[in-house]
Image (cartoon, grey):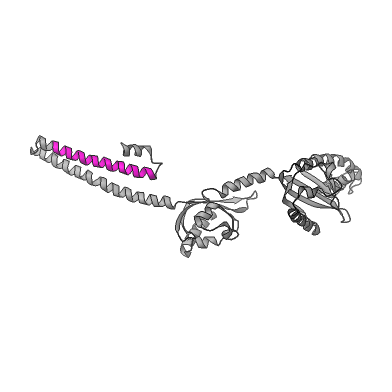
């Protein structure tokens, strides 16, 4: 068994590093010391067997030679149960159709002498639990370029996938339009709200950017929107509350408030753009109607006020000339009180109308309108 670890050590990246270190030593410069490797193999075997990732070594025929502790914990099968054969894969992939897909992928890599990186599969553990595994595999060759076997490293990403699935569910069911565009502005994500607002399904839009020509059919308007977005991107700024008018699939016009952000990887390269759109069509319509209503209400308030002012000015003139009796004064005060009551009623009516639309009205204004 130790020879297997030595071979893996010798032909892996770690062995190459150790060989470089050997070249600087005094004994047998430029040669890989099997004696030193034998001593190191024990240490390497301990690391390998206790690594927190699933590590397996398969011989050229695919039989299991090494099956570490993490492999046992993740799969549920002990090394004693799996070593010496390749039957374990039928247990981990019990569905023949799915197993065929996985096998074809692996065989293709072996045939072309390619390594697999981040190849994700779903296994069924001994406890009948489905787990997501991300595989990295590599062929191990000897000095004559002959296959010694294959090393497979698997990482249990079930929790990550579960979180990703939950996040995608939240994203897809958000009540705002969410889209993700790759660095070439091709659509990769188009959530349910995007479908409902635009009228176009995800199947109709993903993989291209043609939908924007449909949403902005007028070339001049589309250019003005595009120029605005490109200008913001060129200045390395996020787009916030940028309003544009789209034409949905059912030919209705809608007003969308956009917020977009460029996403970059660790190297600073653009991964793509996330776009969040809020349909503010109804809000804009109500706002316009409210402005019109407030204008009308202002006129309705203005007339009684002007009448009161005119009547009071006339009353003052008559009082100054001594032409107004006590009865006339009382009558005029009663009339102006009625006019004032009408003003108060108009204010209350305005308050009720505005409150239905603008719940976040400043408290001071609410108190003024309701008192």
For residue 275, say whether it is visible: no
| 46 relative to 198, above or below | above
In the rendered picture of this protein, how many numbered marks are placed on residues?
Answer: 0
Please provide the residue range marked out in magenta.
330-356
State which quarter of the image contains the C terminus: top left
Q: Residue furthest bottom?
A: 219
Residue 127 as seen in the image, left or right of residue 211: right
Overall secondary structure of the magenta stretch?
helix
Residue 305: image x %, image y %? Answer: 22, 43
Q: Quadrant of residue 49?
A: top right
| 304 relative to 182, above or below | above
| 107 relative to 67, above or below | below
Name the residue rendered at 14%, 36% in the picture: 330
Residue 236: image x %, image y %? Answer: 55, 52
Q: Nearer the viewer, residue 371 or 78?
A: 78
Verify whether residue 351 appears in magenta. Answer: yes
Q: Quadrant of residue 364?
A: top left
Q: Residue furthest top?
A: 326
Q: Nearer the viewer, residue 325 or 26?
A: 325
Residue 206 as seen in the image, left or right of residue 106: left
State which quarter of the image contains the N terminus: top right
Name the residue rendered at 21%, 45% in the picture: 306
Residue 132: image x %, image y %? Answer: 71, 47
Residue 19: image x %, image y %? Answer: 85, 47
Name the residue rendered at 62%, 53% in the picture: 271
For residue 195, say whether it is visible: yes
Verify whether residue 31 appears in magenta. Answer: no
């Amino acid at each position: 068994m130790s020879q297997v670890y030595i071979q893996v050590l010798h032909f892996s990246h770690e062995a190459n590093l150790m060989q470089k270190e050997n070249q600087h030593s005094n004994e047998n410069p430029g040669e890989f010391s099997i004696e030193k490797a034998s001593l190191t193999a024990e240490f390497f075997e301990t690391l390998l067997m206790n690594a927190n990732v699933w590590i397996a070594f398969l011989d050229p025929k695919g039989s299991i030679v090494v099956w570490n502790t993490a492999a046992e914990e993740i799969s549920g099968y002990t090394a004693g149960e799996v070593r010496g054969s390749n039957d374990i894969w039928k247990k981990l992939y019990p569905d023949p159709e799915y197993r065929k897909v996985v096998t074809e992928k692996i065989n293709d890599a072996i045939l072309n002498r390619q390594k697999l990186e981040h190849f994700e599969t779903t296994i069924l553990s001994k406890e009948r639990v489905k787990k997501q595994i991300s595989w990295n595999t590599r062929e191990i060759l000897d000095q004559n370029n002959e296959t010694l076997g294959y090393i497979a490293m698997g990482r249990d990403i079930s929790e990550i996938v579960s979180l990703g699935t939950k996040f995608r569910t939240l994203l897809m069911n958000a009540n705002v339009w969410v889209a993700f565009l790759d660095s070439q502005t091709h659509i990769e994500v188009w959530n349910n709200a995007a479908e409902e607002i635009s009228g176009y399904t995800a199947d109709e839009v993903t993989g291209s950017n043609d939908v924007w020509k449909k949403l902005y059919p007028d070339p001049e308007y589309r250019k003005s929107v595009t120029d605005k977005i490109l200008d913001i991107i060129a200045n390395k700024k996020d787009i916030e509350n940028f309003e544009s008018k789209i034409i949905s699939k059912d030919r209705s016009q809608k007003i969308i408030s956009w917020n977009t952000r460029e996403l970059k990887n660790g190297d600073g390269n653009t991964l793509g753009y996330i776009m969040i759109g809020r349909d503010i069509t109804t809000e804009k319509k109500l706002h316009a109607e409210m402005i019109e209503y407030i204008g009308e209400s202002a006129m309705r308030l203005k007339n009684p006020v002007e009448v009161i002012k005119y009547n009071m000015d006339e009353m003052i003139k008559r009082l100054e000339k001594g032409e107004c009796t006590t009865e006339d004064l009382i009558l005029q005060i009663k009339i102006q009180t009625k006019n004032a009551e009408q003003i108060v009623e108009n204010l209350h009516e305005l308050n009720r109308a505005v409150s239905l639309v603008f719940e976040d009205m400043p408290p001071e204004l609410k108190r003024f309108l309701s008192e």
